[in-house]
């Protein structure tokens, strides 16, 4: 008997181990069960990328029709205007206040370390490399060198820089934001980095800039434009013989700056240019410096950066095994070449390729030297020389090694927070007339989030049932916005009260489904409850895309993928939430739907609830208060990133959506700021003022439950009052 019991127990343990190894769960719907959904964790990225690639293909088809020079000139004017809009209006050109911090002499050249201000107190560290000795009264061609993603900034690219200066070019190399001596997240006392590398620096600042309708790209391009201003101010420089180059992130910057500044005559970006289709199909969007405002939605692609400049000399420097797909590079080159041919200047455009990964090669460097020697009229030997670079300490510009240590130094965060504060002030002024403001806020939320009204909802697919006591759980999937399904659980009470509830949890449909969990509480009250895995969550996430901007287990790159095509993850999920609310009402016959959302899904529910009359009461548990609270905190919670809407602060904020719900029933408890910390009472009152004002205006105060401070450990009491 004991032996049989032991065998049975061993078999059960073995079965449990196998089930655990497979990740099986009785509430799973897609996992290991539906072969056609084996890629379910990548549903969200695949949907965003497929839609964006379709837009890119339409642009490609339109460009393929261009033949004559007038047609190309008209197209150039259009994409130049689009590019200007994506970069946004430039600030005024303020004094550079440039100073030479240090000078050092080397074998055949001199280095001057330069500090200048691209904006007031926004310091740029740089070094000017000059052939030495210089012939008096002779002006030389100059090249602006842009650095890739190295912690040391331009100090990591001395082989190329020194070779250029030894060939008779003046070279001006500067640190991009987040690199070298321009860390945006540095310890205020030591100057040591507090984040792990340039892409993390770019992501933190760039995501905040995008909420305000700006981009990190704009800050970086403006730095480049002001660097050109400094170059042309030097008496040694010939202002009509200017070039620009850089590799990787420097290839990005040199591409973007050359397209924005007409003074640059010859451009040779390296290891960057491909096209959006191949980028999205391969490694996905890269860090914030590369992400302009909705380029794919604006029918703009990589080729357009070079088309804008035609017929000025341009060289694409590529490697066949680059992270930036070579087929995309070839396709882009083919488009650009047609534009140059229309100008009868085909020789002014070159694409060079070496068989190598994402690196600088001797072959490519020598081709680049020869390109500048030809087009900047500085002939000579193009051989790549072995050089002795300056020591890093010789290239240190600031006394403490970081601009953040300089008095009153600005950062992208402080500049962008000022912009966000101006937008917040404009919203406060607009809120004086709520009858006008709130409908406008709702319309802007629809537009900026990329929300789409759901089509006719197809019949859901029942995949199984689970009995729990006297209650029944049914497992379903239903088609979402795109070519994916939303798995969801439907909990039926033993005795129905005729009401339905939608339960949204960022950890997925099973998060509140444990015995004696929150969903069971509602079921025991008689509610029929629908709990989904919104796309990208639960069984449908998080996907394999992490990207180069992966912070606290959150991919900023996935968020960029939506923004590039004029969408947001929140907008997609809000559309699916409305779809589910309507499905739930239809399946249960309920007159309306109550909805609960937790943490970072609260913005999704707010967006959905203002678009869906079916959602009649809303509970927000542990929400963050506003997009402003994210933009105004230097250290914000990265878990909130996927719920942010690019450009939102230009037109609305989350409290506006909550106010627009009035007179629907609304509960908010456990409210935090953008840093994830509970709001103080004054902060809570300020953030919820517009909500209270609207409910008071409609004499609906009894419908509003705003609970400051920490939420109760047991929410049953609050839920009971909210459900009354």
Image (cartoon, rainbow, N blue to C red):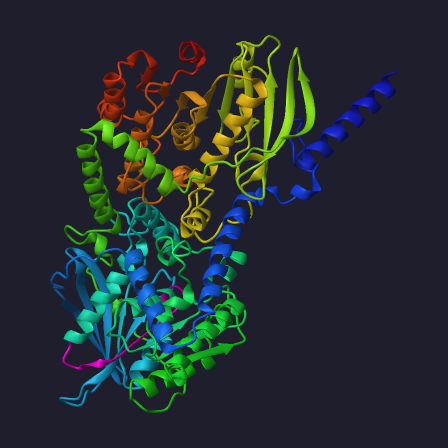
457 left or right of 362? right
Q: Which residues are magenta?
A: 234-250
Residue in the image at 23% along x and 18% along y? 697
Residue 365 rendering spot, x and y as whole percentages: 42, 79
The quadrant of the rendering that contains the C terminus is top left
Which quadrant would residue 719 be assigned to in this image?
A: top left
Give residue 489's quadrant in the image.
Answer: top right
Residue 492 to residue 327: above or below: above
Q: Does residue 514 appear anywhere in the picture?
A: no
Does residue 683 appear anywhere in the picture? yes
Asked if the magenta segment contains residue 86, the reply would be no
- In the rendered image, residue 340, in percent from the top left (x then y), is placed at 39, 79
Quadrant of the image containing the N terminus? top right
Q: Position of residue 661 (x, y in %)?
A: 34, 24
Magenta residue check for 244: yes
Q: Residue at x 15, y 50 (%)?
A: 408
Residue 335, image x, y percentages? 45, 72
């Amino acid at each position: 008997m004991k032996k049989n019991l032991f065998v049975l127990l061993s078999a059960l343990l073995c079965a449990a181990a196998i089930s655990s190894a497979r990740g099986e769960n009785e509430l799973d719907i897609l996992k290991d069960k539906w072969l056609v959904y084996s890629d379910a964790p990548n549903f969200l990225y695949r949907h965003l990328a497929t839609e964006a690639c379709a837009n890119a293909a339409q642009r490609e088809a339109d460009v393929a029709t261009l033949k004559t020079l007038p047609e190309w000139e008209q197209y150039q004017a259009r994409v130049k205007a689009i590019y200007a809009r994506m970069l946004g209006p430039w600030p005024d050109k303020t004094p550079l206040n440039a100073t030479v911090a240090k000078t050092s002499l080397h074998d055949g050249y001199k280095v001057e370390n330069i500090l200048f201000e691209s904006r007031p107190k926004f310091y740029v560290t740089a070094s000017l490399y000059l052939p030495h000795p210089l012939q008096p009264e002779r002006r030389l061609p100059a090249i602006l060198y842009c650095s890739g993603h190295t912690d040391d900034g331009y100090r990591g690219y001395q082989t190329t820089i020194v070779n250029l200066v030894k060939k008779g070019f003046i070279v001006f190399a500067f640190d991009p934001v987040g690199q070298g001596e321009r860390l945006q997240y540095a310890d205020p006392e030591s100057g040591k980095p507090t984040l792990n590398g340039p892409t993390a620096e770019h992501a933190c600042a760039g995501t905040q800039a995008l909420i305000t309708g700006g981009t990190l790209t704009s800050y970086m391009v403006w730095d480049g434009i002001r660097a050109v201003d400094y170059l042309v101010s030097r008496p040694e420089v010939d202002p009509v013989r200017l070039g620009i180059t850089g590799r990787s992130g420097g290839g990005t910057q040199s591409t973007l700056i050359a397209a924005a500044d007409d003074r640059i005559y010859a451009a040779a970006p390296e290891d960057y240019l491909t096209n959006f289709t191949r980028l999205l199909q391969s490694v996905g969007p890269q860090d914030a410096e590369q992400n302009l405002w909705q380029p794919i939605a604006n029918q703009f692609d990589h080729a357009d950066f070079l088309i804008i400049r035609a017929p000025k000399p341009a060289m694409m420097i590529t490697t066949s095994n680059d992270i930036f797909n070579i087929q995309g590079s070839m396709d882009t080159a083919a488009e650009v070449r047609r534009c140059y041919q229309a100008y009868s200047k085909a020789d002014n455009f070159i694409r060079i390729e070496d068989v190598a990964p994402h690196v600088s090669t001797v072959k490519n460097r020598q081709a680049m030297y020869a390109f500048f020697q030809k087009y900047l009229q500085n002939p000579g030997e193009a051989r790549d020389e072995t050089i002795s670079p300056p020591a890093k300490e010789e290239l240190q510009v600031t006394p403490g090694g970081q601009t953040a240590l300089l008095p009153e130094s600005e950062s992208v965060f402080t500049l962008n927070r000022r912009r966000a504060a101006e937008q917040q002030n404009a919203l406060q002024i607009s809120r004086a007339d709520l009858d006008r403001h709130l409908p406008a806020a709702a319309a802007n939320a629809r537009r900026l989030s990329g929300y789409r009204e759901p089509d006719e909802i197809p019949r859901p697919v029942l995949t199984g049932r689970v009995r729990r006591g006297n209650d029944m759980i049914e497992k379903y999937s239903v088609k979402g916005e795109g070519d994916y399904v939303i798995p969801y659980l439907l909990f039926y009470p033993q005795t129905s009260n005729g009401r339905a509830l939608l339960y949204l949890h960022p950890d997925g449909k099973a998060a509140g489904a444990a015995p004696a969990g929150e969903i069971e509480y509602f079921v025991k009250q008689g509610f029929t409850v629908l709990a989904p895995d919104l796309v990208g969550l639960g069984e449908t996430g998080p996907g394999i895309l992490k990207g180069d901007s992966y912070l606290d287990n959150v991919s900023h790159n996935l968020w960029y993928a939506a923004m590039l095509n004029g969408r947001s993850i929140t907008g997609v999920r809000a559309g699916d939430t409305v779809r589910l609310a309507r499905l739930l009402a239809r399946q249960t016959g309920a007159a309306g739907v109550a909805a609960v959302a937790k943490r970072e899904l609260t913005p999704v529910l707010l967006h959905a609830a203002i678009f869906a009359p079916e959602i009649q009461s809303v509970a927000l548990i542990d929400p963050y208060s506003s997009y402003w609270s994210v933009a105004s905190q230097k250290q914000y919670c990265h878990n909130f990133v996927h719920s942010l809407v690019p450009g939102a602060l230009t037109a609305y904020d989350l409290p506006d959506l909550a106010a627009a719900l009035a007179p629907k029933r609304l509960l908010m408890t456990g409210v935090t700021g953008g840093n994830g910390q509970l709001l103080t009472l004054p902060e809570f009152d300020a953030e919820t003022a517009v909500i209270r004002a609207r409910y008071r205006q409609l004499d609906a105060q009894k419908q509003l439950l705003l609970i400051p401070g920490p939420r109760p450990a047991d929410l049953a009491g609050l839920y009971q009052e909210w459900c009354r």
